């Protein structure tokens, strides 16, 4: 509502006085920030920031709110002033610190984490085989290779004019994309013995993961192959190349550039989905975290440690993926 | 030539398929004695029955009982760790020979497993918040909201369809009527909900007495109401269909009852002798 004596002209003047100065948006952000922080219990921060012993609690609280808002706004202000790389670096470091602060607030027993960390990482052997993160990586690498072969075969079948190949391929992708991975793992482990094939947990895990991810990746391969312009095949045919050689030498290398980013995504997802095989009692990372967590009611400790290990492994995967992407993207992407 | 190899392949497959089906009598016992190894399944997420210590080794009451059984069979022991559902589903396909996993022999489980011997008994108890005043006896919990682990004997008890299928299982009566049953993935989650406060989500929970006492020791503000509701016999389980192995195990566990080995282990892990139904 506009009161008497405040015409549009006056309003405009007030607006420009208040908000068209360089500091104005920052002040607004500061006020919003303080308003957002106000309802929270900041006693741990204020006690540490102001150290105000004699001040009443409310004054202390508001001092804390203002100080924290100032720090936040100043921080964003600083970040906007620097160049892109530095912005990214500062943001990452700050978010990481906040994350660690969040974990710190659980008051975890770090001693317990360190006493059992080497089991999670899988340093050493159990019954002469890998365990923990090392076993997770082993299962993933094996499943990566097998699922890539399966995916290529299924994609070629799907693109084949042969009805039998097309039928087998579509049936396979339909079933393994259409059922939960956990169920597939149990089917391989419990179902196959019914027809005389008794597998131990780790091969069962690799088979189930390969079948499931092979079905998903088949679609990625198919899309990649279809995206290669038809003229490429025609040109190759004009040169007199055999069909199989055309696929191998002309189409696939060009398709790979498009296949690799989503395929890398699949592998990262697989790294984490491999935790499902803990139901079979394979001693991979998630299993180790759960059992060691239960042993002395230190569940959170072990879960957080496992989360950080999974994250670290995924980060390495991402790095490798971007390297490969760069190699196959030569001459196309910058 | 092609045809020939195909036929051979089919014949080989048929050979591989044929022996699979029901176990032969004495098959498991033969395998154990010839290999010199007893493979026992265990779920190390349940202290004090079974857990992993700081050296990544198995420890617990069930583990010690399993070691004793292997000792008396004159073989080594090995542990495998499939999940509980996989163990209770039966059809172990020779992956492991025995489960010493505090399993209650129910009629449903007896369809896929054999229970040669009972090695101890766990009392099932009603627990409430420490400051609760309205539930002084189990009967007071009638019509209240009670938490239990899903597919446990405690859930069966509250539903009044508990059939313990074991010789010498002490009789019991249903003392809680028309409870509003809340089921959880594990018993511990029910206790976690109960600790939030009296009547916040639950008025009480039914679980094993050792579990409840363990939680109270860990600082859960709970208390145990009255006498145990019923006594659960807990048995050694094997895959169905090997009476010779079953008989051998029954003899061994009998001997362990008689010479006090089980009582000693029970006192070591539970602080009480839980091996006799009469002691409760």
Image: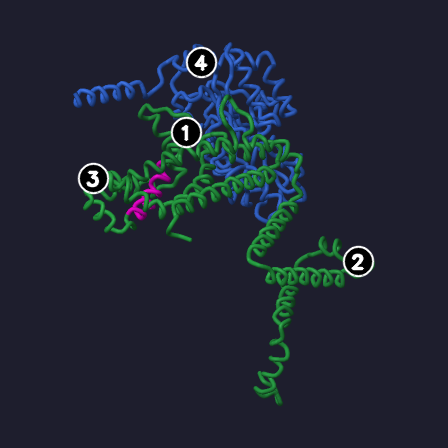
Magenta stretch: includes residue A216: yes
What is the distance, in whole Å, between disc 3 and disc 2 at their CAs? 83 Å
What is the distance, in whole Å, between disc 4 and disc 2 at their CAs? 73 Å
Other-residue count near label 4 (Cα within 10 Å), few / some / many at <14 / 14–19 / ≥20: many
Q: Quadrant of the C terminus of chain B?
A: top right
Residue B256 in the image: x percent, y percent?
A: 56, 14
> At numbered mark 3, what does the secondary structure look like: helix, strand or loop?
loop
Residue B226 visible? The answer is no
Q: Work out whether disc 4 and disc 1 sit on a shared chain.
A: yes
Q: Which chain is green?
A: A
The residue positioned 55% from the left and 23% from the top of the image is B62
* Chain letter, disc 2 residue: A
Residue B86 in the image: x percent, y percent?
A: 43, 30
Q: Are marks 4 and 1 in contact (CB under 8 Å)?
A: no
On the image, numbered disc 1 is attached to which residue? B89
Residue A149 visible? The answer is yes
Q: Quadrant of the N terminus of chain B?
A: top left
> At numbered mark 2, what does the secondary structure look like: helix, strand or loop?
loop
**Region rendered in magenta:** A211-225
What is the distance, in whole Å, between disc 1 and disc 2 at their CAs? 64 Å
Q: Work out whether disc 3 and disc 1 sit on a shared chain.
A: no
Residue A267 placement: quadrant? top left
> At numbered mark 1, what does the secondary structure look like: helix, strand or loop?
loop
On the image, numbered disc 3 is attached to which residue? A242
What is the distance, in whole Å, between disc 3 and disc 1 at their CAs? 53 Å
**Which residue of the protein is positioned furthest toward the bottom in this rendering?**
A5
Residue B53 in the image: x percent, y percent?
A: 60, 27
Q: Nearest the camera: A60 or A218?
A: A218
Which shade of the palette goes to chain B? blue
On the image, numbered disc 2 is attached to which residue? A52
What is the distance, in whole Å, between disc 4 and disc 1 at their CAs? 22 Å
């Amino acid at each position: 509502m506009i009161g008497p004596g405040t015409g549009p002209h006056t309003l405009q003047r007030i607006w420009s006085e208040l908000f068209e100065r360089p500091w104005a948006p920052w002040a607004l952000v500061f006020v919003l920030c303080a308003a957002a922080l106000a309802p929270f219990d900041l006693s741990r921060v204020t006690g540490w920031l102001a150290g105000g012993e004699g001040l009443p609690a409310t004054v202390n609280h508001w001092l804390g709110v203002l100080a924290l808002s100032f720090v936040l706004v100043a921080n964003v202000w600083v970040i906007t002033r620097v160049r892109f790389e530095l912005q990214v670096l500062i943001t990452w470091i700050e978010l990481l610190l906040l994350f660690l602060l969040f974990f710190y607030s659980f008051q975890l027993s770090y001693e317990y984490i360190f006493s059992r960390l080497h089991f999670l990482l899988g340093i050493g052997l159990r019954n002469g085989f890998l365990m923990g993160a090392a076993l997770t990586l082993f299962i993933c690498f094996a499943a990566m290779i097998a699922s890539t072969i399966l995916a290529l075969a299924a994609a070629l079948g799907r693109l084949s004019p042969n009805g039998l190949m097309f039928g087998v391929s579509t049936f396979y992708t339909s079933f393994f994309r259409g059922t939960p991975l956990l169920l597939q793992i149990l089917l391989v482990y419990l179902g196959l013995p019914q027809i005389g094939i008794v597998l131990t947990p780790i091969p069962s895990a690799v088979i189930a993961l390969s079948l499931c991810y092979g079905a998903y990746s088949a679609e990625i391969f198919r899309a990649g192959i279809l995206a290669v312009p038809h003229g490429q095949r025609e040109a190759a045919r004009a040169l007199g190349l055999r069909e199989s050689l055309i696929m191998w030498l002309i189409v696939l290398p060009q398709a790979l550039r498009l296949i690799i980013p989503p395929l890398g995504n699949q592998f990262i997802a697989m790294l984490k989905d491999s935790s499902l095989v803990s139901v079979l009692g394979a001693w991979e990372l998630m299993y180790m975290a759960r059992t060691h967590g239960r042993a002395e009611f230190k569940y959170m400790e072990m879960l957080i440690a496992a989360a950080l290990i999974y994250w670290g492994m995924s980060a390495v995967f991402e790095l490798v993926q971007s390297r490969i992407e760069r190699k196959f993207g030569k001459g196309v992407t910058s | 030539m092609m045809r020939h190899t195909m036929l051979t392949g089919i014949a080989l497959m048929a050979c591989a398929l044929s022996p699979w089906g029901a176990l032969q009598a004495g098959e498991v016992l033969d395998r154990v004695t010839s290999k010199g190894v007893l493979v026992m399944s265990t779920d190390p997420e349940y202290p004090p029955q079974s857990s992993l210590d700081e050296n990544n080794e198995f420890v617990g009451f069930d583990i010690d009982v399993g070691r004793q059984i292997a000792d008396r069979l004159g073989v080594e022991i090995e542990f495998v760790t499939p999940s509980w559902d996989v163990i209770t589903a039966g059809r172990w396909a020779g992956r492991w020979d025995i489960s010493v996993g505090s399993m209650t022999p129910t009629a449903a489980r007896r369809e896929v497993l054999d229970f040669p011997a009972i090695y101890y008994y766990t009392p099932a108890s009603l627990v409430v918040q420490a400051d609760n005043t309205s539930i002084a006896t189990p009967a007071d919990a009638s019509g209240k909201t009670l938490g239990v682990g899903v597919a446990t004997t405690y859930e069966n008890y509250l539903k009044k369809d508990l059939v313990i299928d074991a010789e010498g299982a002490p009789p019991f009566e249903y003392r809680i009527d028309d409870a509003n049953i809340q089921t959880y993935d594990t018993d511990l989650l029910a206790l976690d909900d109960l600790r939030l406060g009296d009547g916040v989500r639950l008025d009480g929970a039914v679980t094993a007495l050792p579990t409840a006492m363990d939680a109270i020791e860990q600082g859960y503000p709970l208390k145990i109401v009255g006498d145990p509701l019923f006594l659960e016999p807990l048995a050694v389980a094997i895959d169905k269909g090997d009476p010779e192995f079953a008989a051998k195990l029954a003899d061994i566990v009998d001997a362990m009852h008689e010479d006090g080995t089980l009582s000693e282990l029970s006192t070591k892990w539970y602080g009480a002798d839980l091996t006799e139904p009469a002691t409760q």
